[in-house]
Amino acid sequence: MEDLFQIILFVRDREYLKGVFNCSAPEPVKNRELMEKMRKTLNVKFGLPAPKWILEIGSVLIRTETELVLKSRWVIPERLEHEGFRFTYNNIDKTLYDILH
């Protein structure tokens, strides 16, 4: 949330910046790595798997498309970084530590 807010201010203060910006973190991770690091940060020994059929039921319950739950896109904020934006939360380790501690 903090980085997103700072991105909004960054773009607002630079009138010459136009168009679309990816506001994702600069070092994306796969879900498996996210879950492993989250368990490590929270000192949880193991996690239960989430098979496709459970995710499909969950997507119905939250009224979203299954594809949005099961598919992903690997995006990086290349344009923001090129323009000089610096993320506070640029990697998953720092992010999880700051959020969960």
Image (tube, rainbow, N blue to C red):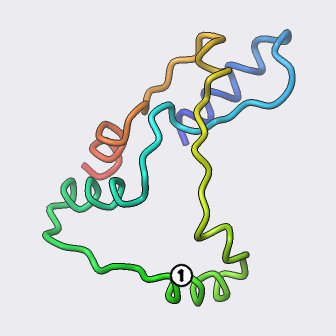
Q: In the depicted view, which residue is nearer to us: 22 or 41?
A: 22
Total count of labels: 1
Residue 33: where, in percent of width, then height? Answer: 33, 54
Is residue 2 toward the left or the right of residue 14 in the image? left
Look at the picture and state if 45 lies above or below 75: below
Q: Which residue is mark 1?
A: 55
Look at the picture and state if 75 lies above or below 36: above
Task: Name the kind of residue labelled 1 in the image.
Answer: Leu
Residue occupying image coordinates x 85% and y 9%? 16
Residue occupying image coordinates x 81% and y 15%? 17
Quarter location, residue 23: top right
Quarter location, residue 14: top right
Quarter location, residue 62: bottom right
**How packed is label 1: few (under 14 Cα within 10 Å), some, or many (20 or more)?**
some
Residue occupying image coordinates x 73% and y 75%? 65
Is residue 47 toward the left or the right of residue 54 in the image? left
Residue 5: where, in percent of width, then height? Answer: 62, 34
Look at the picture and state if 64 lies above or below 79: below
